[in-house]
Image (cartoon, helix red, strand yellow):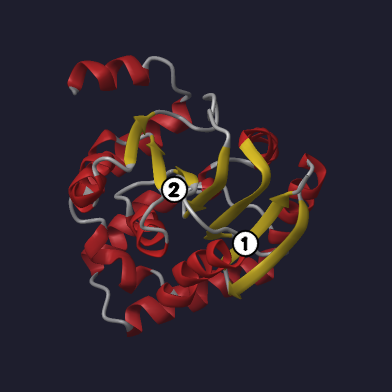
Amino acid sequence: MISSLKNIQSTLSDHATTIQTVFNKHAQAYDQTRRGLIPPYDPFYGTVSQLLRAHLSGPIRVLDLGAGTGLLSGMVLSAFPDASVTLIDLSEAMLERARERLSDHVEAVTFRVGDYAHASLGGPFDAIVSALSIHHIAGEGKLALFRQVFQALQPGGIFINADQVAGSSPEIEAHYRKNWLERVIAAGVTEETLAGARERMLADRMSPLADQLRGLAEAGFTQVNCWFKDFSFAVYSGRKLD
């Protein structure tokens, strides 16, 4: 594993290497902090499954970008037990947790360690999903990724991103941050957990929601829409129609 990580790091940008290092460091305790750090946890993740069920049926091929510990992939497999899911993430340590989580689905899952922003996505896939990952990519990089995602989808496929977005002004962004801090403290999140979250947040490159929806349309997606929003937490999608 050490040699493979060194080979991967040699091809990564400084920012990607920082993300890899930080998430490797926090992989062990990552899952235990999710509910406390994501105030709208259930509707946030639940919207992804709802959208998949509304638009797709039968055995489907799914790509999970920045899959981390496999939390979202596990939900996809619960909604579609006959799905095949490919998980890609920079952090080998996070994917090790995903392997443990998805150990009952070994024939249905594939794991890839790499930088999805600069790698071939493969495919074609019926759905490409992501949760709390794409906000680590700067604005222009997001637009380039959306074009790659569009190309990697089957006609009729769907892209769904559950992520954090930036406020459309400094004042709105400050309100987002204040609201998040108040809610996680009220939920009983510890100072240690907050410190870890703040360390990971240094890698954030969030963009306003409107910019991302416009980017999807420019990449060729139709039926572009935001289905859920709670301050900085948003779930949006686009379709690749025939």
Residue 28 x %, y %: 18, 50
Q: Quadrant of the N terminus?
A: top left
Residue 20's disc is: none
| 152, above or below 190, in the image | above
Q: Amino acid at mark 2?
A: Leu
Q: Position of residue 86 (x, y in %)?
A: 40, 39
Q: Nearer the viewer, mark 1 or mark 2?
A: 1
132 lies left or right of 161? left
Residue 7 figure quarter: top left
Where disc 1 sits, the SS reads helix
The residue sitting at 41% across, 50% down in the picture is 83
Mark 2 lies on a secondary structure that is loop
145 versus 209 height, above or below = above
Q: Earlier in the sequence, mark 1 or mark 2?
A: 1
In the picture, the quarter occupied by the C terminus is top right
Q: How many marks?
A: 2
Q: What residue is pinned by disc 2?
A: 202
Q: Is residue 68 visible?
A: yes
Is disc 1 surrounded by few (<14), some (14 to 19) or many (20+) residues within 10 Å? few
Look at mark 1 in the image and give the residue it sits on: 55
Task: Look at 76% across and 46% down and name the residue there.
Answer: 215
User: In the image, is 223 to the left or to the right of 106?
Assistant: right
Q: Is residue 212 left or right of residue 232?
A: right
Q: CA distance from mark 1 to mark 2?
A: 35 Å
The vertical placement of 99 against 43, above or below, is above
Position of 225 with respect to 191 (left or right) is right
Q: Which quarter of the picture shows residue 151?
A: top right
- Residue most toward the front? 58
